[in-house]
Amino acid sequence: MSDAPHKHEAFAAHRHGDLGAAERLYRELLRAHPEDAELHHYLGVLCHQTGRAVESAQWLRSAAALAPASIPTWQLLIRVCDAMGDAAGALAALDRYLALSPNDAGMLNVKGQQLTRLERLRDAEAAFRRAAEISGNAGMFHDLGLCRRLLGDLPGAASAFHAAVQRGHTQPRTYLWLAQCLRAMGKTKDYYDVVTQASAAAPRDLELLIEAQSARRYVCDWDGFESQQPQLIAGLKQVLAHDGAQDIPPGILNYLDIDETTIAAVARRYAKQLTAAGRSLLDRPHDAASNRTRGKIRLGYLSTDFFTHAVGTLVRDLFASHDRSRFEVYGYSLRHQPDAVQACIQRGCDAYRDLSGSSAARIAQTIADDGIDILIDLAGYTSAAQPIALAARPAPIQISWLGYLGTSGGDFMDYLIADDTALPTELARHYAERIIRLPHFMVASPLPVTERPPAREAMGLEGAGFVFCSFNQPYKLDRATFEAWMDILNQVPGSRLWLYAPDSDICTANLRAFAARRDVAPERLTFATAAPMPEHIARLSCAGLALDPFHISGGATSVASLAAGLPVLTLRGQTFLARMGSSINKHLGLAELDCLDREQYVTQAVALATNPAMLATLKERLASALTTHGFFDTRRFARTFEEALRIIWDRHTAGAPPDDARVSART
């Protein structure tokens, strides 16, 4: 039989589905013609069709070596490597293919996907960008946005998602990611417009509704928020009632007036999903034996906020304050924003890992390979966090602290740090974690107070009236809080309320309109934008009393007020988030600032504003308490914190399970 008919017979058998005969003929032909690239190619095709991916890749590579200009061979090799999860192999084939066809947008996009899997995000971004530029394809702009989001390039991600939407990529998830980028960028009006319109167009999408409710809180659209709240609560109940329904990240729910029982149930469902996904992340488990030979406890701090952020500002000096005879300190940063706070944190660590843009698997493996004994998570379920890395269990003890005050809902977090005021026993029942109770759960690094106070007029505070202030983010405000504040203004003639409202004309308009409805002249509200910390603390001297919101109290915001010598009046709420101010005032011994109901809150605010001697005495006591209790003494806090860590580590090494712990103050 001649070669040509024999080859033709092999192709015919392959074409008609007789794969056994085709393979037999291909192999017979290859023994006679081992350098026939076409035979190598089609045997690779056949192996691919019969589920033998490794063998298929071998034949396709040999075909490509014999015929390097064969575009179909490279295309199939790319597909086979991708199906095997061989990102490096797929990338090598892509580079050879794109050398032959450099403007193939589809393959450029595939290259971006493979580079993303290899965590070469900057190279991936270039590939995605080139693909989108060539094609103008909505899906490719969407993929570009996802890559930029992983890189932390929020403006670039928002631009790409916006381009995707303009070109018809109108899936709810695209709008959600665009909205989240705008929120993180502080583009409040754009955030509100995008997500509320998208939610109206897809009213059954629960995650979009949750984000839209968040946006309404950001602009103080309380009428809109309250009108949609029954739909949100019904949607959450429906999710919880059905196994297999979508799992909702619980983080943002803590800010949306959802009851603690529901949030805890949502967290448990979400944690169950994370636990299942996290089991396979670690290639090499944590080596517990190596820890016992060091003599020091190795601490790891995991955060998205090691920069000038509420969390970063609070913890800035803690790392350098740890006792190096007993502890080693590792920092793991999930978001790269270099500034003075970040530099200080890095200097305070024995080792500092920039893991921004890293996969959960890489984060978990890095922590495990570093041999961390106790991992302290400062991110929880907040934006840019990677809780699946925690679900992989990279450390034998894992603690939640400060950055996220809700429960993880899972058994991958052993402990949560609190105090008796912030999280009393009756509220701790909603938490999956065991509770470590310190005298005061919050650390406060010293803040700069060297700037000269500005004139009140320069702050827009003309006149001699009393100034109340609240520099909390607008999303922390609600109708009940603002009604109380308007009642206070009405009882203190000539007084003003000084608020923080960055980049949001819609927010200030809503608040002024609300004030008018409560018989308060809108001009009695003054609005400020962000300022560097020294300037911010200096300008706070223009106010007489800080007012804490009811349902989401201030943390770092209140600490800044205290640094300026400004008392913070708070109402003790029913959640950890609503009790931060109470925790601070209780710790400082300022019981008169820790109100138990709305009437006491309003009465005390009016009394302090209308009795200068009473307020002056209170400020003197505040200044003394800050020193007496070492409020800004991170070394003193570190000694107490370390005692808690020693107790739970000793318990772990003795083979005992996690349990509640209580620690008294150390000096």
Image (spheres, rainbow, N blue to C red):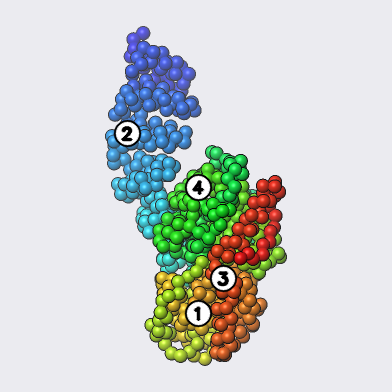
Q: Secondary structure at mark 1?
A: strand
Q: Residue at x 39, y 20 (%)?
A: 11
Identify the mark at residue 440; answer none if there is no mark: none
Q: Secondary structure at mark 2?
A: helix
- Residue denoted by label 2: 96
Q: Quadrant of residue 168?
A: bottom left
Going from N to C along the chain, the mark reached first, 3 or 4, is 4
Q: CA distance from mark 4 to mark 2?
A: 31 Å
Q: Are the residues at dot 2 and dot 1 in contact (C-beta closer than 8 Å)?
A: no
Q: Are the residues at dot 4 and dot 1 in contact (C-beta closer than 8 Å)?
A: no
Measured as percent of width and height from the top left, residue 212 is found at 50, 64
Q: CA distance from mark 3 to mark 4?
A: 33 Å
Q: Relative to 426, say whether 299 is above or below.
A: above
Q: Residue at x 58, y 41 (%)?
A: 290
Q: Secondary structure at mark 3?
A: loop
Inspect the image, locate mark 3, and give the three-letter code of the amino acid beneath it: Phe
Judging depth in this view, the residue of 140 and 528 nearest the camera is 528
Going from N to C along the chain, the mark reached first, 4 or 2, is 2
Judging depth in this view, the residue of 302 and 83 nearest the camera is 302
Inspect the image, locate mark 1, and give the three-letter code of the amino acid beneath it: Cys
Binning the other alpha carbons within 10 Å of mark 2 as few (below 14), some (14 to 19) or many (20 upward) gives: some
Going from N to C along the chain, the mark reached first, 3 or 2, is 2
- Residue denoted by label 4: 363
- Residue denoted by label 3: 631
